[in-house]
Amino acid sequence: MGNSAKIITVAGKGGVGKTSICACIVRLLAERYPDKKILAIDADPAVGLSVALGVDVKLTLDDIRMSIVDSVENGETREALELLSEARFRIFDALVEMPGFAFLAIGRPESSGCYCKVNSYLKEVIGMLAGSFDYVVIDGEAGIEQIQRRVMEKVTHLLLITDQSKKGVQVITTIKEVADELIGYERVGAIINRVTNPELVAMMQPPVEVLAAIPADGAFAANDIRGKSVLELPADSVMLQGVKEALRKIEIL
Ligand SMILES: Nc1ncnc2c1ncn2[C@@H]1O[C@H](COP(=O)(O)OP(=O)(O)OP(=O)(O)O)[C@@H](O)[C@H]1O
Ligand SMILES: [Mg+2]
């Protein structure tokens, strides 16, 4: 009950493995805590987490937001409170029940350009759903926008993901600075992903403790290319083992 939910998110440069790591987190949590309520949110308009978890999405958060906006524009005069309770009801409609976890996609707004409307709606939804789940795992978009817009303000565990590049480390350093100002997180840590030169990891200067350095994993990439979900990976997968190590260090597993 209440606000004891652990809300875990990933942040970092584009293409460093955020979605892949999120999918692994969801699988590991579902395996470790079969009796807990786990929610995966795909908060990247470019989607990806649904594919990584093999979820078939029919209704997105943006569909719900738009249908509520439409009904207001059609001249139905309703109280704000009524709208909110309708939104609450319909959000549970959009949750896809998977074995061991629930899934919600924010979707891709039809109108081009700015995602700010769905982002501000998403922020409310995260706060609302956190009360109904024990673990919420959010796959965000690349960069700092969702942190800057306080979409992630309720996050308790922030995982900063980087590859071996200087640029990747710069991005998570900036994200950490912004997060310190705008998020009341409890725990933070870095994951270095797709490591090809382990001896170089020691020379890197990430802004926070490194929870795990995950080697480049050909089997993971091949699984992804074949369109298979992370749920189909063998349990001894390098990627799953690396993410498990990180989650243990940050006391999630
Ligand atoms: N440890 C790894 N070894 C090999 N390939 C990996 C590893 N981690 C991720 N990949 C591959 O790298 C690609 C990008 O990963 P992913 O989509 O998870 O990154 P992302 O940070 O979510 O990207 P975006 O910023 O576009 O959302 C994918 O093809 C994925 O299979
Ligand atoms: Mg992604």
Image (cartoon, helix red, strand yellow):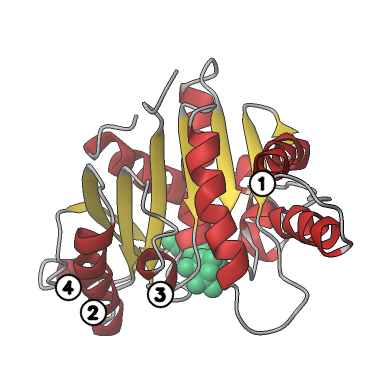
**Looking at the picture, does residue 137 appear above or below residue 44?**
above
Q: Secondary structure at mark 1?
A: helix
Element at label 3:
loop
Disc 1: which residue:
80
Q: Nearer the viewer, mark 4 or mark 3?
A: 3
**Where's the N terminus, which quadrant?**
top left
Along the viewing direction, whichever of 221 and 12 lies nearer the viewer: 12
| Label 2 – label 4 distance at C-alpha | 16 Å
Residue 118 seen: yes
- Does mark 3 have its CB less than 8 Å from ligand 1? no
Instruction: Give the side of residue 169 with respect to residue 231, left or right.
Output: left
Looking at the rendered structure, the secondary structure element under dot 2 is helix
Q: Are marks 4 and 1 in contact (CB under 8 Å)?
A: no
Q: Which residue is nearer to you in this view: 105 or 167?
A: 105
Quadrant hosting residue 225: bottom right
Distance CA(mark 1)–CA(mark 3): 33 Å
Q: Quadrant of residue 178?
A: bottom left
**Residue hosting label 4:** 200
Q: Can the viewer see residue 217? A: no
> Where is residue 35 drawn, in percent x and y?
53, 15
Residue 99: mark in rendering: none
Q: Which residue is mark 3?
A: 143
Q: Give the distance between the C-alpha atoms of the residues marked 4 and 1, in whole angstroms.
A: 55 Å
Which sits earlier in the primary sequence, circle 1 or circle 3? Answer: 1
**Residue under numbered circle 2:** 170
Q: Amino acid at mark 4?
A: Leu
